[in-house]
Image (cartoon, grey):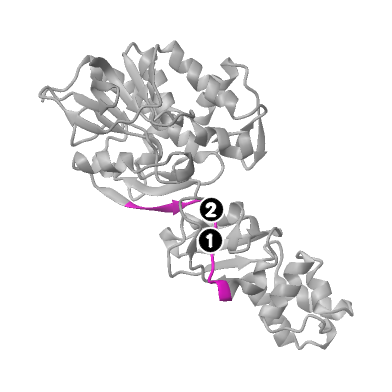
């Protein structure tokens, strides 16, 4: 039997940050992970460069059934704080797009920083090691059953993430532990994920796989809706690309998405102007604004003859084409699922957690952090910032709790 102040299960972004912070505050910490490869989600992120935060991360960039929950942790540990940590280790970075920060080196640089921070906190590593069961003892501490024996801890932090990308080890462990201790779950589903369409409906566009363009995408209405102007990418089965991944977190089954293929101009007005000044086919005109293959395929699906001369088309028809370009409605039939989802939406209901400490309001000494909880960020470094911020909040609080546990 091994006894520690704090056991952290899950050695990903949130778990390593939490363990390092708690260890450096004097707590005896053990960090447990079932995978033989450390922090694979960090390693593969950002095309291997790790989009580790976003300069503009704030509560408005996160989805949750309890939208104010993330405010406290994000305010207390900001993107600047993580940038300062990387700077201490001489890790350099660059801004790629809309505040997204990527390492100049590989993602391994971020993993190495977290490993070194854990070493500075004298964190004990146990990996690969599977926790088969979590129990509480009579004093309110936690007992973890593993193939290597029992591990005891005064506090337990669950940082095992969500269900996305099972091939690198994602499991429902956090959700099982939450339910075991009486916590509610917000329904989970894939997020930041490509959208798919019925094979028959998508057949005309399947040949466009690999073609991309900038578009404005919207779905839903009011507080549950969203709008993003980003690149989209045609695939064999549907749509991907940054804008589609963003909108997927808001899309609800049975609802359409709407694409403005010419977000920088009034399409109807531009077509009428073109009619007065040029003598060319409609497909050649649209090919000035869109990829030529997209223009041709799109016109075919709208029932417009691609070789029709703009000058010969009635104004009413041009207005209709312009309206359709500005609001092309599509009905997804699903997503590519957890295998291609970058994150999991939903998770442990945060209404049963403290927003300042991440501790359960049902079970003293039990914490949930990172992707395991119902806080889902936008694409572009926001989810890593939540991992860092929630990990720091729980690490600080768990270290204090271990010194002065609440009586049972």
Residue that carries the numbered disc 1 in the rendered image: 195
Give the quarter of the figure containing the C terminus.
top left
Q: Name which residue lies at 27% across and 33% down.
A: 132
Decide if residue 226 is on the left or right side of residue 182: right
Badge 1 density bin: few <14, some 14–19, many ≥20, Cα 10 Å: many
Q: Which residue is mark 2?
A: 246
Q: Looking at the image, which is closer to me, 228 or 246?
A: 246
Q: Which residues are magenta?
A: 187-200
Q: Position of residue 77 (x, y in %)?
A: 44, 28
Q: Residue at the front extreme?
A: 147
Q: Is residue 39 visible?
A: yes
N-term mark: 2 or 1: 1
Residue 144: x, y in percent? Answer: 24, 27
Q: Nearer the viewer, residue 189 or 88?
A: 189
Provide residue 27's location: percent of width, then percent of height: 31, 14
Q: CA distance from mark 2 to mark 1?
A: 11 Å
Q: Secondary structure at mark 1?
A: strand
The answer to whether 372 appears left or right of 386 in the picture is left
Query: The N terminus appears in which quarter of the rendering?
Result: top left
Instruction: Reply yes or no: does residue 398 show up in magenta.
Output: no
Does the image show residue 377?
Answer: no
Label 2: how many residues lie within 10 Å, few (<14), some (14-19) or many (20+)?
A: many
| SS at badge 2 | helix
């Amino acid at each position: 039997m091994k006894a520690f102040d704090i056991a952290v299960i899950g050695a990903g972004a949130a778990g390593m940050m939490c363990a390092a912070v708690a260890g450096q505050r004097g707590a005896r910490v053990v960090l447990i992970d079932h995978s033989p490869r450390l922090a694979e989600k960090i390693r593969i992120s950002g095309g291997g460069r790790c989009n580790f935060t976003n300069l503009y991360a704030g509560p408005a960039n996160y989805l949750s059934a309890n939208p104010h929950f993330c405010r406290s942790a994000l305010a207390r540990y900001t993107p600047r704080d993580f940038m300062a940590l990387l700077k201490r280790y001489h890790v350099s970075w660059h801004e790629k797009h809309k505040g997204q920060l990527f390492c100049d080196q590989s993602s391994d640089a971020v993993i190495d920083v977290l490993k070194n921070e854990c070493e500075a906190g004298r964190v004990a590593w146990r990996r690969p090691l599977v926790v088969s069961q979590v129990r509480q003892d009579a004093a309110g501490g936690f007992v973890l059953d593993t193939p290597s024996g029992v591990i005891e801890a005064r506090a337990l932090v669950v940082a095992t993430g969500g269900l996305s990308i099972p091939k690198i080890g994602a499991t429902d462990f956090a959700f099982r532990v939450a339910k075991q201790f009486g916590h509610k779950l917000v329904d989970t589903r894939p997020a930041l994920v490509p959208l798919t369409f019925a094979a028959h409906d998508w057949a005309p566009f399947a040949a466009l796989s690999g073609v991309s363009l900038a578009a404005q995408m919207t779905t839903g209405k009011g507080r549950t809706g969203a709008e993003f102007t980003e690149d989209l990418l045609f695939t064999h089965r549907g749509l991907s690309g940054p804008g589609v991944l963003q909108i997927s977190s808001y899309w609800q089954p049975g609802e359409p998405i709407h694409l403005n293929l010419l977000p920088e101009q009034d399409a109807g007005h531009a077509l009428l102007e073109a009619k007065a000044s040029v003598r060319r086919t409609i497909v050649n005109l649209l090919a000035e604004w869109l990829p030529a293959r997209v223009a041709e395929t799109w016109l075919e699906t709208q029932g417009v003859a691609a070789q029709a001369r703009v000058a010969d088309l009635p104004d009413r028809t041009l207005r209709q084409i312009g309206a359709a370009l500005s609001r092309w409605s599509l009905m997804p039939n699903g997503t590519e699922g957890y295998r291609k989802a970058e994150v999991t939406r939903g998770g442990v209901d945060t209404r049963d957690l403290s927003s300042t400490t991440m501790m359960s309001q049902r079970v003293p000494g039990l914490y949930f952090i990172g992707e395991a909880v119902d806080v889902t960020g936008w694409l572009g470094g926001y989810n890593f910032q939540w991992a860092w911020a929630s990990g720091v909040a729980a690490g600080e609080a768990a270290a204090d709790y271990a010194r002065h546990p609440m009586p049972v």
